[in-house]
Amino acid sequence: MPTIDSCQLTTKDYTILEVMQERRPARGDTLSAILQRKISSAVVVFREDIPASVVTLSTRVAYRVNDGPAETRIVAHDEMRGLVGMLLPITNPRGLALLGLAEGQSISIPTTNGGLETLTVDEVVYQPEAARRERLKLAGAAGPGSRRPGGPVLRVVHLSDEAQDKAAKQVMAALDTGFDDPGPSAA
């Protein structure tokens, strides 16, 4: 299994890591060490150019710890409410370690008890950059004025003058409360 000698980061993800490093003075802890390692080994690419097999922020990834069973999480910028157990924030050593790895790549990181654990990316289940490219490709292939597969069907509807007058009267009647207050005077 290939181990990490470099990682691939989008310009956005790299910038976020730089800001994390600026706000986090070198403490000699696990997170600081992983952060330094990521920044120094990163190959930075535009989001349009990141391979679909690379873990980016908001990617749903299936990974293994050592030889354990695969776990699926969303690598996230920070903790979010409502998705308990689904997110793996980059403020966590595992989340940070997975960021920028490609399918099949591994990285070893220190554990809290002084040992090492190896994380291996099994599969990138969903990557937002790849999904965006796919949406753009579908929209471009459809051509201007054509309908996106599975998208809503829109029709232009023209009302006759009589129907427009009737609709306007219905709206005015619904808004009419019977209270005729001229508002504050300017005097």
Image (cartoon, grey):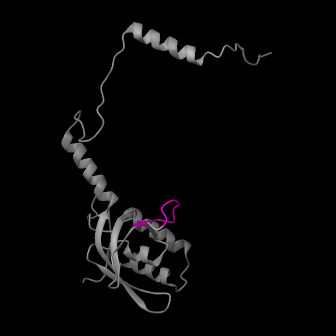
Q: Residue at x 41, y 7 (%)?
A: 162
Outermost residue on the right side: it is 187
Outermost residue on the bottom side: it is 114
Is 6 placed above or below 112 here?
above
Q: Is residue 157 left or right of residue 177?
A: left
Q: Give percent across and percent down for residue 65.
A: 36, 81
Q: Give percent across and percent down for residue 115.
A: 44, 92
Residue 34, by quadrant, is bottom left
Q: Give percent across and percent down for residue 79.
A: 51, 65
Q: Residue at x 56, y 17 (%)?
A: 174
- Residue in front for this viewpoint, 40 or 47: 47
Is 148 placed above or below 159 here?
below
Q: Is residue 106 in view? A: yes
In this rendering, the count of numbered labels is: 0
Residue 175, by quadrant, is top right
Most common secondary structure along the magenta stretch = loop
Q: Is residue 171 left or right of residue 152?
A: right
Q: Is residue 132 left or right of residue 94?
A: left
Q: Residue at x 37, y 63 (%)?
A: 11
